Amino acid sequence: MKKAIQSVVKTLLKMPLRTGFFGALLITLLIFFKSTTNNLVQWDNAMYVLNNPYIQTITLENIIKLCGIYIYWMPLTWLSHLIDYQIAGPKPFTHLFGNVLLHSINTGILFIVAYKLLNLAKPKTDKALLFLGAFMAAILWGIHPLRVEVVAWVAERKELLSTHFMLASVVNYLIYKKSKKQFYYIMSVGLSISALASKPSAVILPIALLLIDIYPLKLKLSGLKKALIEKIPYFFCSFIVGLLAIFGQSKVQAVTSFEQLSILSRVSGIFYRLSFYLSKTIAPINLS
């Protein structure tokens, strides 16, 4: 029996990316599946799904509206809600299952990102240890209580879709840096645009890629110019979507003026949110 288990483990470790991806996906799916029995809460879900006339029927006019600046510019998110509504109308299961499935896939992709980064950072370390480290990191992220809100709240589809495309963009970027094949660079840029078209918060992606260049890719000063040139498409798209987000939020009066909220208050808010998420990541208590 022991030899049989060892044989299975060795076989699985021969294809670590597939094993880790599907393992992380299935564990996360099983843990969050119960949330598909929930009802849709009114908070934002009414505006995004239940009372949103533009997702209730497929017409050219509705698609044009959803692809424009409707609250945010996030056409892929709106179109995903449109598809769900066509499948099941306002019934909760399809909308919630879409969130659970997306999050489970994201956990699997995070394993791939973590495994590739660990291999770059620690190339001489035993592959089984790298696999275990990447797998544990993905699972801890995937099933952490802080993830419950984005999975169980249908209005947070935008966060899940954006994360999905950002992670996929990073995977393709890492493949590009290793293979030097332009196809993967183009894929990475395209996926970053998809992330931005899901939620404007994906504007942080080019910064994340630069940090990956520095470590574990060990960017040298001589290669800094090339690295920055590579990021121009990412930064340009982020800049444009950032402007669209500000314009869209101002239309629904969600942008606060500096008279109402000072620069100091805004900076303090950023540090508060950072400290909140760091503390709740370590000790996820009193979340509700």
Image (cartoon, helix red, strand yellow):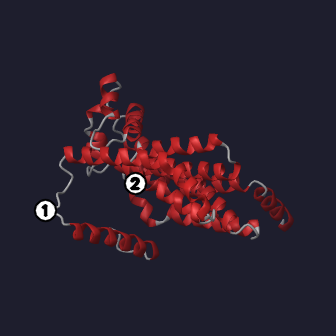
Q: Amino acid at mark 1?
A: Glu
Q: Nearer the viewer, residue 23 or 33?
A: 23
In which quarter of the view is residue 264 placed?
bottom left
- Residue 282 in the figure: left or right of residue 30: left
Q: Nearer the viewer, residue 106 or 206?
A: 206
Q: Nearer the viewer, residue 46 or 137?
A: 137
Q: Nearer the viewer, residue 163 or 120?
A: 120
Up-down relation of residue 48 to residue 38 (above or below):
above
Circle nearer the N terminus (2, 1): 2
Picture disc at residue 259: 1
Q: Residue at x 40, y 48 (%)?
A: 238
- Residue 185 in the figure: left or right of residue 193: right
Picture disc at residue 152: 2
Q: Position of residue 160 (x, y in %)?
A: 45, 50
Q: Amino acid at mark 2?
A: Ala
Residue neighbourhood size for the residue with mark 1, other residues' Cα within 10 Å, grouped as few (<14), some (14–19), many (≥20): few
Q: Residue at x 39, y 74 (%)?
A: 285
Q: Residue at x 48, y 45 (%)?
A: 233
